[in-house]
Image: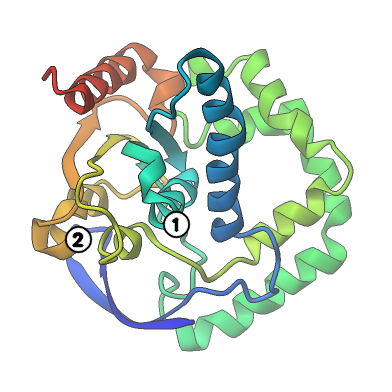
Amino acid sequence: PILENVPLGTAAGGNRLATSLELRHPLKSPYNFYTWGEQIADFTHDVIHNDNNKDSGENSKVTLVANSIGTMSALQSILDEPTLYDGCFVINPNFRELHMAEVPLSPLAMPLVRQIQSLLRTKGHGLFESLATPEIVTEILKEPYAVTDAIDEELVEVLLNPLLTKGADEVVFDTLSYSAGPLPEQQLSDSAFPGDIPVWVVYGEDDPWTPSGRVENLAKVCNNGDGPVERVLGLEGAGHCPHDEVPERVNELLSQFLDRLDGTN
C-alpha cells in the first residue's frame, strides 16, 4: 500500500508532508519491518510469556526498548499486537536516510539510488568481505559513537560475528535496498497506535546520524502533540548508542520509565 500526505519532521525541527509513502519492500524481501515486528511478537508469545506462565500462570505485558532502526520494528509490533505491550523506550530513532520519502529531490535521485543498490547486490560481495573485519568495524563505529572508549573488543565481536555468517551480505544489501516501509512519525501518528502505550524517546545530542531537531519535534509532529510520545530527552556528550556510551544515564531514565508504567512515579 501507498500512504498519502503523511506528516513527517525535518532535520531542523520543522514539519512537512510526504505526498506518498510506499510501505512495501521494493524487492518484496522478507527482511522488512513487518517481518521483524512479527518476530518480536512471536518472541513475546513463545519465550517471555511461556517462561512467565511456568511461574505465575498468567501473561504480563512487556516493555519494549529499541535503538536506531529497531525503533520501527518495535513500533510496528505494537501496532500489530498492542495487547502484548505496556510501553516503548526508544533510544536514538533512525529516520532512514535512504527512504524515498527522505531522499532530497526523490523523483530525480531515486533512479540513481536504485542503480547503486542493484550494483551492490550483484557486485558488492567482495567489498562486503573486505569491510567485515575487526579493524574496519572499529573505525566505522568511531563515527556514530561520541564516547569512543565504549568501542571495545566485545562490542566489535558482537557486531561482527553475525556479519561473518553465510548469507549475511545478502541480508545487508537487501536492507540497504529497503527505500520504503514505515517511518517513526507515520507509525506514532497511526490511528491504530494505542493511546495507553506511552513512548519515551532518549537520544545522544552528538549523534551524527539522528538530527536532534527532528527528534525533539517528534511529539509535535505526531497528532499535533496529542500522540503517544510523552517525553523526549537529549543526552549531552553521547552519540548514536548512549546505552553503550553513557549506560548509567540511560539506565536511570529507563528505570524512571518503568516506574511510570508501574504507577510509582
- Image location of residue 92, percent across then percent down: 37, 40
Q: Name the quadrant containing residue 43.
A: top right
| Residue depicted at 68% across the width and 32% down the height | 137
Where disc 2 sits, the SS reads helix
For residue 81, above or below residue 106 = above
Q: Residue furthest bottom?
A: 107
- Image location of residue 210, percent across then percent down: 36, 47
- Work out whether residue 53 or residue 4 is closer to the camera in this orientation and state it: 53
Viewer-nearest of discs 2 and 1: 1
| Residue depicted at 40% across the width and 56% down the height | 95
Label 2 close to label 1 by CB (< 8 Å): no
Q: Is residue 108 left or right of residue 207?
A: right
- Image location of residue 123, percent across then percent down: 86, 65
Q: Name the quadrant containing residue 129.
A: top right
The three-letter amino acid code for the residue at tag 2 is Cys
| Residue depicted at 60% across the width and 60% down the height | 32
Q: Is residue 65 visible?
A: yes
Q: Which mark is residue 172?
A: none
Q: Is residue 216 left or right of residue 112?
A: left
Q: Residues within 10 Å of mark 1 (few under 14, many from 20)?
A: some
Q: Name the quadrant containing residue 203.
A: top left
Number of numbered discs: 2
For residue 214, above or below residue 24 = above
Q: Which mark is residue 80?
A: 1
Q: Is residue 185 left or right of residue 39?
A: left
- Point out the image quarter for the C terminus: top left
- Work out whether residue 138 or residue 37 is closer to the camera in this orientation and state it: 37
Q: Which mark is residue 222?
A: 2
For residue 204, above or below residue 124 = above
Q: Is residue 207 visible?
A: no
| Residue depicted at 55% across the width and 70% down the height | 179
The three-letter amino acid code for the residue at tag 1 is Asp
